[in-house]
Amino acid sequence: MTDNWTRTRIVNELRQAGLSVRSLSLKTGMKEYSLYSALERPYPRGQTIIAQALGLTRHEIWPRFYDGRDIRITEAARNRAAFKAARSRQGAA
């Protein structure tokens, strides 16, 4: 599984696009620091705003939170997938 982009990478990509997290928050009618939480933990609305500003999908930036169809992966679904993978490895051994 691919890791999510780092906070630093996201901030740098926004800067290259002439934006900041703060300015993007204000531009979208949110409180000035609202989008910072989207950099580290699941926050679908905020992550959609950031991804759209960069011309990407949420999955491209946060593959651990969103599947290839850009649908939120819940913790329960992630645990089920890990359990199934472990069981299939046991069966193969």
Image (cartoon, grey):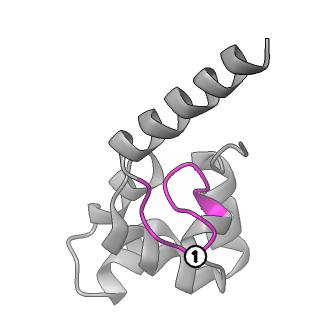
**Neighbourhood count class around disc 1 (C-alpha, 10 Å): few under 14, some 14–19, many 20 upward:** few
Q: How many marks?
A: 1
Comparing 8 with 70, the one in front is 70
Task: Tell me: residue 74, above or below residue 24.
Answer: above
Q: Quadrant of residue 88?
A: top right
Quadrant for the N terminus, please: top right
Based on the picture, tell me whether residue 54 belongs to the magenta stretch: no
Q: Is residue 18 visible?
A: no
* Relative image position of residue 92 (x, y in whole percent): 78, 20
For the point 55% across and 70% down, which residue is it?
Answer: 58
Task: Tell me: residue 29, above or below residue 16.
Answer: below
* Residue sitting farthest toward the right: 93
- The three-letter code of the residue at mark 1 reads Arg
Q: Is residue 75 left or right of residue 65?
A: left
For the point 61% across and 55% down, which residue is it?
Answer: 63
Q: Is residue 40 visible?
A: yes
* Relative image position of residue 54 (x, y in whole percent): 64, 80
Q: Main secondary structure of the magenta part?
A: loop
* Relative image position of residue 13 (x, y in whole percent): 70, 67
Q: Circle 1 is placed at which residue position?
A: 69
Q: Secondary structure at mark 1?
A: loop
For the point 66% across and 86% down, which residue is it?
Answer: 55
Q: Is residue 5 left or right of residue 79?
A: right
Q: Which residues are magenta?
A: 61-73
